[in-house]
């Protein structure tokens, strides 16, 4: 009888009667949320691009426990404006020049809404045929734009892709030379390869002492030395656009070396690969259906192809190419300004839309200690960046290259119109 009493109480408690997905309420709240986001972008330049809050700020402002009864969307959006936006670093701001390019667009946002709205759990073909097949179609489109071979394998995130390919290369090599060679497998990268490679190697069981991070682009003698030591080179990660300086590894020569030693080559182009839809920046399965659960670590897969489908159809290849070219043009202009200013040094050659520089420092009189001069320059550049970012008006990032503290600037902004870039 107790359960019947509880059921009766729930029926008579109007606060507890919530329909999770009511079409008309979804329509009303959806309009409000779209307006909210549109207003945010219309006024994005009025915000300090770098959040000015202190760690732990939000815990002091929000209740200790979740609300027992529902709250209105109006109240929630008020709190978003009051508490959340001050704690956001505005990646889509025209004054954001840090880390890597933003990826916001009207078509992208609407694609996310469609993807989330359908709420697909795409772990195999039958779970939602359109999710699998649309991804195959748009990835073929993207592959054609990038001038990739007809057969190429698409993964999920960058970190997951590196892990999956490394595991496949590991198993292939062990099948060839025997499982007892596991502790002798060697992975190669450069000193600017993304940290995801080392993480993937650890997860895949590669001994930490067999991870090579070379400054000399994986010289042949390094591989020869490992072979002579009885080790088994099996995986090389080359990068097209490193996150520190946008450096591009010599893919062709590296592949020739890898071919001689049967090394699996993984090209990480997560950072700069999108620029390859522009022809100037390009380097030159028999199953009827695909079950993406077999291609990845996670079981389910989001319907992300919907987002790419809307972006490609809404803007077209020509406009996307012009958009990327316009970012490269901005970076070229910035590079010229820096080179004409003797207070700064352009540290690495500009590739695509990333610029690296540091402030020049005159050596101290009678101080021939190079280490002291480098330390002094690093401290000055660090303080300069802290001053720039501390204003909140502009945001840039930094990296360390050969012991030097470098300031990074990315030419980017979704606020610049598509199709206005120059031919390059």
Image: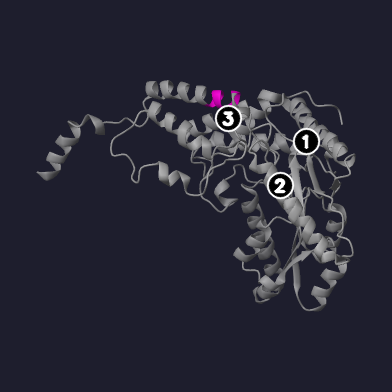
User: Would residue 389 be found to the left or right of residue 150 on screen?
Assistant: left
Q: Give whichever of 118, 383 is nearer the camera.
A: 383
At mark 1, the secondary structure is helix
Mark 2 lies on a secondary structure that is helix
Q: Which residue is mark 1?
A: 277
| Residue 298 included in the magenta stretch of the image | no
- Is any part of residue 266 visible from this angle? no
Q: Which quadrant: the N terminus? A: top left
Residue where numbered disc 3 is placed: 109
> Can you tell which quarter of the image residue 362 is in?
bottom right
Q: Provide the major secondary structure of the magenta segment.
A: helix
**Mark-to-mark CA distance, 3 and 1:** 21 Å
The circle on residue 385 is: 2
**Label 3 to label 2, Cα distance in Å?**
32 Å
Give the residue at x 86% y 37%. Answer: 337
Within 10 Å of disc 1 (Cα), the crowding (few <14, some 14-19, many 20+) is many
Describe the element under mark 3 as helix, strand or loop: helix
Q: Position of residue 86 (x, y in %)?
A: 52, 37
Closer to us: 311 or 374: 374
């Amino acid at each position: 009888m107790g359960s019947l009493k509880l059921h009766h109480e729930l029926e008579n408690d109007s606060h507890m009667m919530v329909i999770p997905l009511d079409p008309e309420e979804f329509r009303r709240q959806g309009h409000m949320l779209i307006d909210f986001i549109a207003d945010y972008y219309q006024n994005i330049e009025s915000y300090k691009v770098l959040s000015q809050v202190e760690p732990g700020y939000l815990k002091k402002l929000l209740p200790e426990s979740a609300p027992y009864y529902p709250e209105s969307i109006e109240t929630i959006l008020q709190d978003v404006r009051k508490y959340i936006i001050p704690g956001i670093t505005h990646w889509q701001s025209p004054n954001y020049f840090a880390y890597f390019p933003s990826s916001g667009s009207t078509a992208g946002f609407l694609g996310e809404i469609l993807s989330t709205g359908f709420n697909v759990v795409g772990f195999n073909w039958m779970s939602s045929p359109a999710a699998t097949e649309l991804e195959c179609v748009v990835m073929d489109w993207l592959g054609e734009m990038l001038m990739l071979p007809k057969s190429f394998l698409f993964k999920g995130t960058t970190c997951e892709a590196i892990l999956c390919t490394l595991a496949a290369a590991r198993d292939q090599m062990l099948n060839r030379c025997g499982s007892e060679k596991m502790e002798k497998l060697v992975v190669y990268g450069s000193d600017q390869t993304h940290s995801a490679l080392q993480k993937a190697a650890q997860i895949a069981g590669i001994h930490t002492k067999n991870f090579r991070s070379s400054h000399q682009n994986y010289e042949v003698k390094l591989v020869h030395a490992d072979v002579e030591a009885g080790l088994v080179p099996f995986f090389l990660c080359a990068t097209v656009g490193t996150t520190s300086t946008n450096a591009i590894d010599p893919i062709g020569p590296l592949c020739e070396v890898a071919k001689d030693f049967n090394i699996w080559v993984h090209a990480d182009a997560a950072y700069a690969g999108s620029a390859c839809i522009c022809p100037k920046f390009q380097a030159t399965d028999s199953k009827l259906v695909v079950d993406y659960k077999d291609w990845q670590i996670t079981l389910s897969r989001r319907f992300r192809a919907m987002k790419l489908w809307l972006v490609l159809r809404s803007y077209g290849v020509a406009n996307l190419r012009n958009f990327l070219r316009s970012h490269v043009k901005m970076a070229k202009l910035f590079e010229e300004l820096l080179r004409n200013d003797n207070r700064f040094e352009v540290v690495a050659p500009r590739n695509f839309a990333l610029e690296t520089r540091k402030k020049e420092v005159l050596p101290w009189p009678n101080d021939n200690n190079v280490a002291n001069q480098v330390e002094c320059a690093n401290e000055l550049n660090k303080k300069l960046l802290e001053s720039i970012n501390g204003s909140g008006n502009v945001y840039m990032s930094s990296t360390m290259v050969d012991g030097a503290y470098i300031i990074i600037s990315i030419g980017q902004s979704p606020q610049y119109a598509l199709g206005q870039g120059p031919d390059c």
